[in-house]
Amino acid sequence: MRTDVRRPPQRSGDRLSLDVLSAVMKKAGYEDATEFTTCLYDVIDPDALDSLFHRQTKAGRVEFVLDGYEVSVHSSGLVEVTEEK
């Protein structure tokens, strides 16, 4: 079972990294960000993730594991979260 978060096209100031954290929190049932056992920065540079996809990006995807969940971030704005296999 996966949890999908679809975001609108990025506007200036949008933080994709925050969408990722929100999606994992939703999937894990976390009520607060302090429940993470792994810091996002230990897995992927949040600033690099935020700047990776922009309006001109046609295709692409980045995948990583955070707190036991596989995260796929697509250039379309889709964030998929599934339990790690």
Image (cartoon, rainbow, N blue to C red):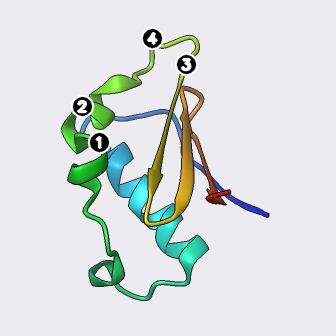
The C terminus, quarter of image: bottom right
Query: Within 10 Å of the Cα at label 3, are there few (<14), some (14-19), or many (20+) other Cα atoms?
Result: few
Instruction: Indicate whether 33 appears above or below 3.
Output: below
* Labels 3 and 1: the sequence-earlier one: 1
Instruction: Indicate whether 77 appears above or below 51.
Output: below
- Residue 51 locus on image (x, y percent): 28, 28
Query: Within 10 Å of the Cα at label 4, are there few (<14), some (14-19), or many (20+) other Cα atoms?
Result: few
- Residue 23 locus on image (x, y percent): 52, 62
**Amino acid type for the residue under numbered disc 1:** Ile
Report the mark closest to the observer, 2 or 4: 2
The dot on residue 60 is 3
Instruction: Indicate whether 83 appears above or below 16.
Output: below
Q: Which residue is labeled 2 in the image?
A: 48
Report the mark closest to the observer, 3 or 1: 1
Residue drawn at (55%, 60%) of the image: 69
**Amino acid type for the residue under numbered disc 3:** Gly
